[in-house]
Image (spheres, coloured by chain):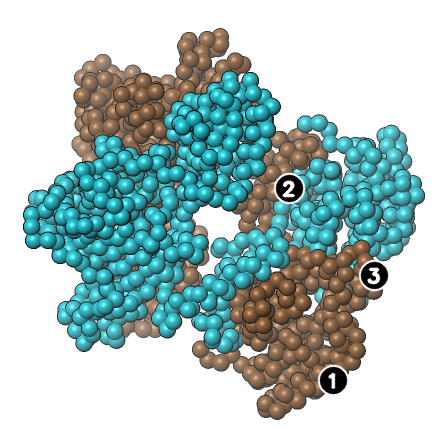
Chain colours: A cyan, B brown
Amino acid sequence: MDQLRFDGRVAVVTGAGGGLGKEYALLLASRGAKVVVNDLGGGRDGSGKSTFADAVVKQIKDNGGQAVADYNSVVEGEKIIKTALDNFGRVDILINNAGILRDKSFGKMTEQDWDLIYAVHLKGAYKTTQAAWEIFRKQKYGRIIMTSSNAGIFGNFGQANYSAAKLGLIGLANTLAIEGAKYDIKVNTIVPTAASRLTEDILPPDMFKAMKPDLIAPVVAYMVHESFPDTGAIIDSTLGFGIKAHFVRSEGAPLRKKPTDPVTIESVKENWSKVVNMKNAKHTKQISEVTLDLVEKLQDFEERSKLDGDRESYWSNYSYNAKDLTLYAIGVGASTTNESDLKFLYESHENFAALPTYFILPGMAMESPLVGQAMPPGKHADFTNILHGEQYIEFVGDLPGTEGEFTTRSYVVDVLDKGSSAVAVVNSEIYQNKELLYRTQQHIFVLGQGGFGGPRNSAKATEVAPAPKRAPDAVAEQRTAEDQAALYRLSGDLNPLHIDPNVASISGHSKPILHGLASLGFSARHVLAKYGGNDPANVKALKARFVKPVVPGQTLVTEMWLEGKRVFFQTKTKETGNVVIAGAYIDLKNVVSGGASSAPAQSASSSGPLKSDGLFAKIKQEVDKNQAMAKSVGGIFLYNLTENGKTIKQWTLDLKTPAVYEGAPKSGKADTTLSVSDGDMIEIAAGTLSPQVAYLKGKLKIAGNIMLAQKLGPLLKSEAKL
Amino acid sequence: MDQLRFDGRVAVVTGAGGGLGKEYALLLASRGAKVVVNDLGGGRDGSGKSTFADAVVKQIKDNGGQAVADYNSVVEGEKIIKTALDNFGRVDILINNAGILRDKSFGKMTEQDWDLIYAVHLKGAYKTTQAAWEIFRKQKYGRIIMTSSNAGIFGNFGQANYSAAKLGLIGLANTLAIEGAKYDIKVNTIVPTAASRLTEDILPPDMFKAMKPDLIAPVVAYMVHESFPDTGAIIDSTLGFGIKAHFVRSEGAPLRKKPTDPVTIESVKENWSKVVNMKNAKHTKQISEVTLDLVEKLQDFEERSKLDGDRESYWSNYSYNAKDLTLYAIGVGASTTNESDLKFLYESHENFAALPTYFILPGMAMESPLVGQAMPPGKHADFTNILHGEQYIEFVGDLPGTEGEFTTRSYVVDVLDKGSSAVAVVNSEIYQNKELLYRTQQHIFVLGQGGFGGPRNSAKATEVAPAPKRAPDAVAEQRTAEDQAALYRLSGDLNPLHIDPNVASISGHSKPILHGLASLGFSARHVLAKYGGNDPANVKALKARFVKPVVPGQTLVTEMWLEGKRVFFQTKTKETGNVVIAGAYIDLKNVVSGGASSAPAQSASSSGPLKSDGLFAKIKQEVDKNQAMAKSVGGIFLYNLTENGKTIKQWTLDLKTPAVYEGAPKSGKADTTLSVSDGDMIEIAAGTLSPQVAYLKGKLKIAGNIMLAQKLGPLLKSEAKL
């Protein structure tokens, strides 16, 4: 790297007679800066006088640098800035470093102890900074450093005065960073730990001795360099380490059940554990984001309350990715031996998609206490007496993408009395970015908890539909693997009934049984392949009742009847002839008879500007500039930029013509297709995510001529790191 | 919940003539507190006089409460505290709420604007708090509130004075929280957003109107209640929401390559992206933790540098859990049809364990650029021309547990010249909590990159060992599934060669091939079952060379020869007779001939005190108190408390006797065994993790009589939530 220089710059360093300030002054001067070496000449507690600054100036001059001594107090900061102007005609850099200590436990602290610390640290930095501010603003350039302390950030016994002043400086820097932004005035805070009484007792002696100011000076020098990228940052440095600090905020919580409830001291206490739960805390850059975040939280709270009415809903979050989808697909019998299934098993397949039945899982809300809470008095439900009786799923719009985050609202719509058993009907609504994507409904049988005089049926329940009386129009057969349940359970339902011979035996089964949803996944695949062109986007709704258990290793026989766009189906086990899934149907968007076929690739939906658009604009520039080099690679590359696992924009890198443009290749076909999320694309370009790692983690998917993709790297390395 | 009361408490509220302060005063008085209603009687900018405080006092008295007005300035805080003592004889609560605004852009800010804001907000809170401090300390009770602002935390245009003062208050609170801790003095900060000019332009009008002080007052009232648990907390509240804020620090980075290098401005710049990477930022509670963290980072840096010497190592982190182990076990052919394999497939199995070959994966460091960097000039390696040639693994101590985090150091020890190809020999050392657990070595073939005149062999390479010439002592056969590669790749090696027919074809294979490590996993299982009692802890080391590819669906034939404690083996595909793994061996700790057997349960190693020990002590108290109730459950429960997936302490809950004690059941056998990490146990007890959720996520494992475990809940619910 070229030396980072400060030629032509004038720097003011307060408290530069010794310690850190001296190191700053020496280092900046050695790199070409003209330096005002300010020092009041005081001891640690601010008393006494000295000529330290002169000595530092002499040292700088002896080394061929330029410097001038200044003995003004920082509380008359305007005089220090005047020294810079008088001697060097300008000022570019201000390092507020001067400081003293007056440590006392709070009870014993005198008003003078408080005032003196405030004056030197906080007021002094204010005064000096303000004197420089208008100069910086007019010249549209300035670099300011505040010096804070971990004693302020964390508090420290005996330093009430110091910790207040030191955190005040961060508050000042926060606002100045904002006000200075459009004038290229950067205001940052250093939190240095040099060898001091503070650290002497705590650290191993060797480490204490090693805490030298010359390990911190290069950090501050970089922070006041022209090329320094950040403003408003808090950087902790010592011993050759750098650490950044910032505030994060908890997700927080409403302090009442409903927006119409009053907030009381008691309701605050009830919700406190959620308020202070920092698990998903996140950083907010500016106060306007805080407000927006609040607006969003409020709207959420109000919308949820409106949805819920008097009913208690359970809200949960669910996230999934390509690996979850492929694991599930294997779990429900998709196989590479069936070419048209490869798109469910291979995340880089050009038509990679989820099996529609996968989306039943986010609606399960397995962790919710809803069913237990919904039981009538004297009845109870826990996971030892419940059974998954029926399942419904209905997509509102398109099939969700191949990765994403959902918010699920679940609630019990009815509890039915079926005589010996109760049935809880549980609805779930699955949202992504506030948009309702699909609905599910589960019928949960609660064994032995009926007979409470409740209704037998509910208008809110989606009912099964009996299959037509005629012989099936089509039949598909598939054997489940001996380890099908062991495999399927890795998709989330770890109930030991499906793997533990003892638990299965207690429940009256000769061996662990297959999950009902696994069998359903098999049959839904059979229907989709037979009548839906094996295109998962073709499924509109599905309903099924689980009748009897399946033992892993048994062969599932799916019998299908086509009527209009509805495929009725039921599932039997070949070995026993038992019906295991009954009254089931799938409503298709389009019937595609005649067995499986590969669905066409989806085209990208139109989209607003993406973060990576600028990157492609830059690539375009480079390619235009270096046409011969581009042609030496010679392939056509299609970039699918994705969001939530769906392509939202395409860019073509045609290195044959060469040309770079938005959209699919004009020539018709790409040699290599690269799929990557907008965010990951930026990370790759920024170098924080290597393309190799992205590829290995399935974040960057490469289809077509993968060898060609290798050639991209060297070509664009210097510019865009593709 | 019972009403939270303040009877007998005396509260001082500054700036209580209107707005938030008035609400605080009214609410506290309505709950029994005697209140000093302080108000200077100034307008927003501190000018003017009023009798607002009298009006508030009147309102309190009209409602039957007790209050007195006080018109002193907070900069004479001692007078305000005196008012409390004079009128009510004591003071328990101080809410520093008084505040004014003098907003100006920094260039236009006068010194008076700065001084006034400082005086009222920061100095005033200091003065008033200090006057109360010795009283609080002597009575060993006090509740203090500082009032900060998001304008300080984030900065806000035109509020340099205000943001400095407001963050200064947090600094003050930080130290006072520490100094007050042992006197039950709690010092917390409220960040209120009430309707103000600040928010008027940003918020929807409805929301602005809804920002009422009575939504914030209950939060502050709870924060000054006797029962309030926190100190030093920053709580943002408005509109009935509560959010906590605190500082987090980045992992940070050394600012030089080696501890002996100088830190330069350039080396700082080079490492800056790591310094400011907040991805794994974490909160540090106090300054001493910061120091300890630093000591640890430094030691790490120095130890790593010492290990590395002049060599460049690649350090990476790896974490795994029970699901990863079971997915891997299925991927290498473990099956529930083999009873003795269940312990590899079922996370709640009493002997649940990892297959030893799983631990090859953390040593792969697939993302490292090492091999590419190690190539001689003119030669190159990328994932299109490399092949996994040989693999070695050697355990230093015990087999790692069933979940955990590793730190892996990888480095190239030699690059061999094999004529047409190069071979990079890559060592990895896998650490947990700084302890070396095991080593691996990979031989990576780099096709077509030999002939650079390098050595053909290396003393640092662990060599394969040819099988004895005699007929094998034992043979095991197992067919791989058609989808074995599709399944195995979910354990992390997503190379399309193993699933994409096109990529396989380009590489010269008729169809996608199985991962060499998958075949090795099969054969290692065969050896372990035949000669190791199927006890994974029995494996000391393993070495193998990958010779030819396997196609999923082929049958693997493992031929074994026992010599001493070494089992030589090679693997063939039955369909072709080809040797696919050659020169392989496993060194066992103990030879257990005669096929698979179940290994005995490991006993817990002794351990120091755990966080959950206190919890069990409490349970013991409860059980002793309610013996009849305990006996009504009547089972014997064994708790295995785990760390990194290994049991480190056992507690027995014998509800037959009844008795609660450390260690395994004295009666010999537990009815139900519950395994849970020490940390999760605490979370379950604290109610932040429900036992049901813990169970469903595999965090709480229950073996034996699972129905009995259900009975535990109600018994201990009120006390310990088991």
The secondary element bearing badge 2 is classed as strand
Residue at image position (58%, 54%) is: A284
Q: Please, which chain is the residue tagged with disc 1 on?
A: B
Q: Disc 1 vs disc 3: Cβ atoms closer than 8 Å?
A: no
**A249 in relation to A380, above or below:** above
Relative depth, front residue between B151 and A593: A593
Q: Specify which label sits upstream in the sequence, 1 or 3.
A: 1
Mark 1 to mark 2 CA distance (whole Å): 53 Å
Dot 3 surroundings within 10 Å: few (below 14), some, or many (20 or more)? some
- Secondary structure under tag 1 reads loop
On residue B51, the disc is 1
| Residue receiving disc 2 | A242
State which chain disc 3 sits on.
B
Q: Is residue A484 above or below residue A291?
A: above
User: Which element is circle 3 on?
Assistant: loop
Kind of residue at badge 1: Thr
Mark nearest the camera among 1 and 2 is: 1
Residue A635 seen in render: yes
Query: Which residue position holds label 3?
Result: B110
Residue B361: assigned label: none
Q: Nearer the observer, disc 2 or disc 3? A: 3
Residue lying at 46% horizontally and 63% vertically, measured from the top left? A300
Which residue is at the front of the view, B36 or B262? B36
Determine the residue positioned at 42% across, 40% down.
A604
Residue in the foreground of this view, choosing between A92 and B414:
A92
Name the residue located 92 percent from the left edge and 41 percent from the top edge. Answer: A87
Q: Where the C terminus of chain B falls, by quadrant?
A: bottom left
Q: Residues within 10 Å of mark 1 (few under 14, many from 20)?
A: some
B552 vs B192, left or right, is left
